[in-house]
Amino acid sequence: MPQNSDFSIYNLPFGIFSAGRKKARVGVAIGNQILDLYAVAELGHFDEIGVKKEVFDNEYLNDFIALGKPITNAVRLKVQQLLSDQNSPIKGNDGLFEKQADANMHLPVFVRDYTDFYSSIEHATNVGKMFRDPDNALLPNWKHIPVGYHGRASSIVVSGTDIHRPKGQVVPKDAKSPVCKASGRLDFELEMAFIVGKETELGESITTANAEDHIFGFVIFNDWSARDIQKWEYVPLGPFLGKSFASSISPWVVTLEALEPFKVEGYEQDPSVLPYLEYNGKKNIDINLQVGIQPDGGGETIVTNSNYKYMYWNMVQQLTHHTVNGCNVNVGDMMASGTISGKDETGFGSMLELAWAGTKPVKLNDGTSRVFINDNDTVVMRGHAEKDGIRVGFGEVKGKVLPSF
Ligand code: CA
């Protein structure tokens, strides 16, 4: 195992891979390898858990996730045991492993619905300062509601997928009416997303006490945004085509169980929240996040270092609020955190904030600078948690911006 691997024996995230003659199927990342769970199941190692091998012969994780946490956790612990034991029956069986470098990673879940929250107080404050009132940046509802909107699931793509610069209506500087053109203000948004692992019935509400039973795991989420399209279209119903053209996710789904040791206290919420949003225990997670920009043919520059722990509204509050009206959720639904910004400009989660609406260009190592993302730039996001020598990470989500069609 390489040192400092995101995919330590404590992690064991699930994903969908194909390699050589193996078509898409379920695997677990370990070091720089992938353990083929279908092949492991064929050998009968999951028989005692009662899992049929067919569930791993699958283009998506949804069927596996839908088996429920007692089963999926048992599979993960069995894999941990098989990979740890000195006398493991899978030791030396090369047919069970593939090199990550030789495999293709696929979208891990079929996403039926995608919701995007707006839960980082630093991000919401920065945007409010730029576009509204510097002295009164947060809107009156912000500290009472985990603000969110329904996003577009069809355009969620896996890391490595190229993104075409979107076209749309924008109002040029000093013009009074719009034109339809390629966005000149293409941005990334540094986010985490959790994947729903247990459905609810229409009319049912999740509570903060049981919300974690409904959360399978997490990916890093780059919520690409076209700021000029967004600015013109968002009144009065909110984000639309400035957001829906693409969101990129990391391919390995890290389970909530693997992230358990990294939970931390969240913000003290003042004013106090309504009773249905009150919660007990640690619900924020300490995950270091970074973003790099790599110009075509050049080296990468890290432009921000943030952390998932800087969430004002946590995952259980988000899911509880989402279902307070009886809205049902399904296995594979994706809930993104909203842009995660740290306390100062070293940790801002979008170019909009890093370059402060275009007024403070961000210098790259090759001498060029950016206020937004250029054609042929690649944006890379990484995330990992680390404590007491234990590392649990996500790898990366990477996307290259191609010129507009
Ligand atoms: Ca977003």
Image: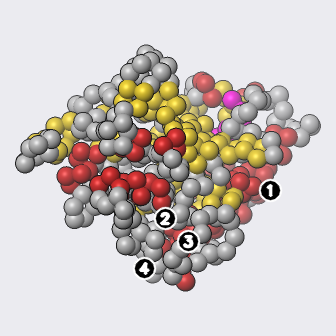
Q: Nearer the viewer, mark 3 or mark 2?
A: 3
- Going by the numbered disc 2, the residue's amino acid type is Asn
Q: Is residue 281 left or right of residue 140?
A: right
Mark 4: secondary structure: loop
Q: Position of residue 145 (x, y in %)?
A: 44, 72
Distance of mark 2 from mark 4, alpha carbons?
A: 15 Å
Q: Residue at x 36, y 49 (%)?
A: 154
Mark 1: secondary structure: helix
Q: Which residue is mark 1?
A: 48
Q: Position of residue 110 (x, y in %)?
A: 47, 51
Q: Which residue is mark 3?
A: 269
Distance of mark 2 from mark 1, alpha carbons?
A: 28 Å
Q: Nearer the viewer, mark 4 or mark 3?
A: 3
Q: Which residues are magenta?
A: 25-32
Q: Is residue 131 left or right of residue 297?
A: left
Dot placed on the residue nearer the N-terminal end, 2 or 4? 4
Q: Residue at x 24, y 45 (%)?
A: 228
Dot placed on the residue nearer the N-terminal end, 2 or 1? 1
Mark 3: secondary structure: loop
Q: Which residue is mark 2?
A: 330
Distance of mark 4 from mark 3, alpha carbons?
A: 22 Å
The crowd level at tag 1 (other Cα within 10 Å; few <14, some 14-19, many 20+) is few
Residue reaching furthest to the top:
297
